[in-house]
Image: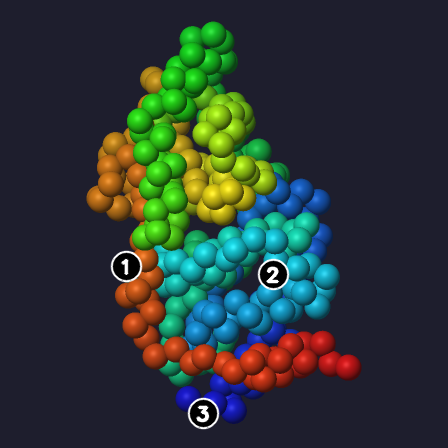
Amino acid sequence: MDRKELLNQVKDYFANSDHWRRLCAALAVDPDPQGSHLHAYVETSVHPDSLEAIITGYFEKLGWPSTRRIDHMAPKPGMGSLHGIEPKGKPHFDFQWFFNKDVGIRPCEGGESGCNLLVWNRWYINRFYEKFPFRQVGSQEEKTLDAYFRSEHFLKGLDIATQSTTNHMHINVRTSVHPEVIQKFAEAALDREGWKFDYTCPNVYMVKGNYQGKLVFMCRNPEVVFDIGWKFDPGVIIEPAMETWIFEENPGYDVWTSDMLAEVMRADYVRLSGEEIQQVLEACFPG
């Protein structure tokens, strides 16, 4: 693709596209940013390092500086993600891309559930929770929860989350306990293990064509984002889920690795120069 044409497409996407404006509008008006999450889907040939520089530069211009490291990962074969973008005071979101050598950048046709921009907020999550008859929590439930969050399964998950080859990971459990209760015990366990975290975001994610619950832990030290994926099971308080949810490897967990990202990065991406990135930002904020 001609470089001038590519650069013009990138300028037009960030300065004029409905897709980018809707994403920013959703970020701007959310009254509960720590309870919300977004996914955006694009096709692009631009290197993710360049996209990250444009996105963080754009938000800096708005007075929304990035508050944490942005992880690069591959959620599935052929798809990359700038994962955990968090402008200051706004919801965190994932900017997912599919490589297309003939495109600078443009919104996908579809992406997830037929949409190229998805928003989950507290209202959505509360409606999602209404599907489940969560059990009342008494002393036995509290003992079981405390024991789980001291267990080898949970502690091994924390170890996996900090490994250099891990781009992202989920600890998978079956439970009949409300996620807000699980969150309380999980955060206490993180405190006990000496982890520092900013907040926990309730969310959902796609498993075999259906949305399933998860809790997203936005950790500061170590600076990682890991999730507890949960599946409702009325017969148990909480226990490891050892069946396959996304990947067969690492039973009890789903782990997205640097090798998965390396496969996505084999494509011939175009790195923009610092001057070209500045031109994109000037197109978005003229004068």
Question: With respect to residue 175, does 28 lie above or below?
Answer: below
Residue 59 appears anywhere in the view: yes
> Label 1, on which residue?
259
Q: Can I make out residue 203 in this image?
A: no
For the residue labelled by badge 2, is the local secondary structure a helix, a strand or a loop?
A: helix
* Residue at x-position 51% and y-position 42%: 221
Badge 1 crowding class, 10 Å Cα cut-off, few under 14, some 14 to 19, many 20 or more, is some
| Res. 252 image quadrant | top left
* Label 3 or label 2, whichever comes before in sequence order: 3
Q: Residues within 10 Å of mark 3 (few under 14, many from 20)?
A: few
Q: Nearer the viewer, mark 3 or mark 2?
A: 3
* Figure label count: 3
In the foreground, 236 or 144 = 144
The front one of 171 and 192 is 192
Residue neighbourhood size for the residue with mark 2, other residues' Cα within 10 Å, grouped as few (<14), some (14–19), many (≥20): some
Q: Nearer the viewer, mark 2 or mark 1?
A: 1
* Position of 183 relative to 110 (above/below): above
Residue at the (43%, 8%) spot, across then down: 140
Residue type at mark 2 is Leu
Instruction: Tell me the number on the disc at residue 2.
Output: 3
> According to the image, label 2 marks what residue?
23
Left/right placement of residue 138 relative to residue 285 reads left
- State the separation of the CA atoms marked 3 and 2: 28 Å
Residue 247: x and y in percent read 26, 46
- Give the spatial CA distance, label 3 vs label 1: 31 Å
Q: Along the polypeptide, which appears first: circle 3 or circle 1?
A: 3
| SS for callout 1 | helix
**Quarter of the image that includes the N terminus:** bottom left
List x then y, in percent, for residue 103.
44, 80
Q: Quadrant of residue 234?
A: top left
